[in-house]
């Protein structure tokens, strides 16, 4: 992984945790929330950060910080297909 990718991943991880911190303890966010917040432009370029945001969420799951949900239920990151939500571990 290139250094720029590592920096992007760390920025997205921090962004995910910051967004969750600002919301209630049971609130969730979409990876697109993190991608938009971390993107440093004013066009649709944030879309290029969607997969990195999902990857950052998976890393935070492995670290025990968050869980990925679908339909309000926690799912294994490797099993998640389609839209996901991210929330703090309960």
Image (cartoon, grey):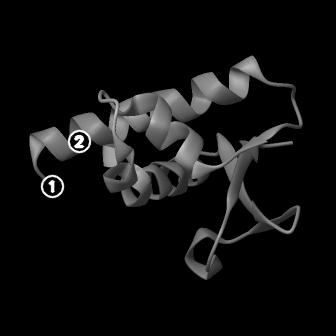
Q: Which mark is residue 1?
A: 1
Find numbered disc 1 in the image and state the secondary structure of the residue it sits on. Answer: loop
Indicate the position of residue 58 as horizontal and vertical percent values: 52, 57
Q: CA distance from mark 2 to mark 1?
A: 7 Å
The quarter holding residue 8 reads top left
User: In front: 21, or 62?
Assistant: 21
The residue shown at (31%, 46%) is 45
The furthest residue to the top: 22
Q: Is residue 58 left or right of residue 45?
A: right
* On-image quarter of the N terminus: bottom left
The residue shown at (40%, 31%) is 38
Find numbered disc 2 in the image and state the secondary structure of the residue it sits on. Answer: helix
Sequence-earlier tag: 2 or 1: 1
Indicate the position of residue 50 as horizontal and vertical percent values: 43, 55
User: In front: 12, or 37?
Assistant: 37
Q: Which mark is residue 12?
A: none
Whether 61 is drawn above or below 35: the answer is below
* On-image quarter of the C terminus: top right
Disc 2: which residue = 6
Indicate the position of residue 56 as horizontal and vertical percent values: 45, 48
Whether 78 is drawn above or below 9: the answer is below
Q: Residues within 10 Å of mark 1 (few under 14, many from 20)?
A: few
| Marks 2 & 1, CB-CB < 8 Å contact | yes
Indicate the position of residue 21 as horizontal and vertical percent values: 71, 21
The furthest residue to the front: 43
């Amino acid at each position: 992984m290139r250094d720029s990718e590592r920096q992007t991943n760390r920025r997205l991880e921090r962004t995910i945790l910051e967004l969750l911190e600002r919301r209630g303890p049971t609130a969730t966010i979409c990876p697109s929330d993190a991608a938009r917040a971390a993107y440093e432009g004013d066009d649709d370029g944030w879309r290029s950060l969607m997969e990195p945001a999902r990857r950052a969420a998976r890393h935070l799951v492995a670290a025990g910080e968050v869980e990925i949900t679908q339909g309000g239920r926690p799912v294994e990151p490797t099993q998640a297909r389609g839209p996901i939500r991210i929330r703090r571990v309960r």
